[in-house]
Image: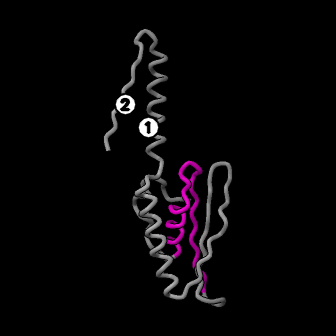
Amino acid sequence: MEQIITLKVDHEYPEEAHHAIDEAVKAYKSDELKWTEAEIAEAKRLALQIMARLCLDGYDIVFSAKTKTDHTTSISVFLSKNLVSERKMGFCMLSNDKWEIWIARCVCLCRAIGKYVPSFIIRKAGECW
């Protein structure tokens, strides 16, 4: 995706020009970190697909309440077939500026079942812990 940013600066005031450019770069980078509707939809589709498969296989799926701190938000998922079976667990912690519930659920479920976290999530959010 290509974006064109037009910026007018007065050459007689270079400090203001530097500040304007820095602000434009900051605005561009903050938009770059936001999840697109397509990314959220794909994470939701993958999460629902995994949950449907787990339900068909007889698993109980329990998500923990999200925990928010000053800089991060996290949730966990616990999977079990019955009370005595081994539980599987997945965890996701994202910085607050990258938090999105379906992205986090997708990460948790992928980790719980031993599947790779999708690359579009890793590219934007890192390892999510």
Asked if residue 27 is positioned above or below residue 48 in the image, the reply reads: above
**Residue 104 painted magenta:** yes
Please, what is the three-letter code of the amino acid marked with disc 2? Answer: Ile
Q: Work out which quarter of the rendered image holds the N terminus and state it.
A: top left
Query: Considering depth in this image, is 123 or 67 the residue closer to the camera?
Result: 67
Query: Considering depth in this image, is 96 or 90 the residue closer to the camera?
Result: 96
Q: Is residue 67 left or right of residue 121?
A: right
Find the distance from the CA under tag 1 to the CA under tag 2.
9 Å
Residue 52, image x, y percentages? 48, 79
Element type where label 2 sits in the image: loop
Residue 49, image x, y percentages? 45, 75
Q: Earlier in the sequence, mark 1 or mark 2?
A: 2
Query: Which stretch did the figure color magenta?
Result: 86-112
Element type where label 1 sits in the image: helix
Residue 50, image x, y percentages? 47, 76
For image coordinates 61% across by 64% down, the residue present is 75
**Residue 83 painted magenta:** no
For image coordinates 47% across by 47% down, the residue present is 33
Residue beneath disc 2: 5
Residue 58, image x, y percentages? 54, 88
The structure's colour scheme is one colour
Residue beneath disc 1: 28
Q: Is residue 107 left or right of residue 39?
A: right
